[in-house]
Image (cartoon, rainbow, N blue to C red):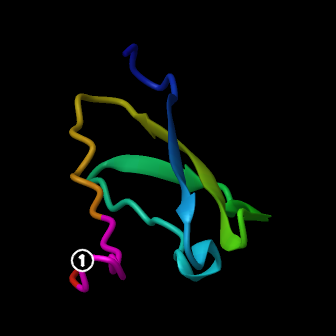
Amino acid sequence: VNANKPVNLTIKIKGIGNIDDIKKFDLDIDDAIVYSDEPKIKTYIKNGNYGGEFTQKIAIVADKNFTIPKIVFKYFDKDLKKE
């Protein structure tokens, strides 16, 4: 990536469950400017199950090399009864 050119990142999570509870992801990257859009959430009922799709776009700009930190998403699997 050239200096001062944005890196565009899209986080998309799709599935069955309460997608509305997913919080906005915030990245903390030293010496970089991070622009995070508000997440867009689309919900639906499919075969009697509530589900949806979470999408968040993030742009990162820096004047030197950087590493995007690991993004962790935890959820509870009701069938396995564990996180």
Task: Identify the residue shown where x is 57% and y is 82%.
Answer: 21
Q: In this rendering, is residue 36 above or below 79?
A: above
- Of the pair 47 and 74, the residue shown nearer to us: 47
Residue 78 place in picture, x, y as percent:
36, 82
Left or right: where does residue 18 sit relative to residue 44? left
On-image quarter of the C terminus: bottom left
Task: Identify the residue shown where x is 37% and y is 16%.
Answer: 1
* Secondary structure mostly taken by the magenta-highlighted segment of the chain: loop
Asked where in the image residue 39 lies, by quadrant, the reply is bottom right
Left or right: where does residue 1 sit relative to residue 48? left
Task: Identify the residue shown where x is 27% and y is 63%.
Answer: 72
Element at label 1: loop
The amino acid on which the numbered mark 1 sits, given as a three-letter code, is Leu
Residue 26 place in picture, x, y as percent:
44, 66
- Of the pair 74 and 82, the residue shown nearer to us: 82
Region in magenta: 73-81
The residue that mark 1 highlights is 80
Left or right: where does residue 62 sit relative to residue 13? left
Task: Identify the residue shown where x is 46% and y is 65%.
Answer: 25
Q: In this rendering, is residue 46 above or below 82?
A: above
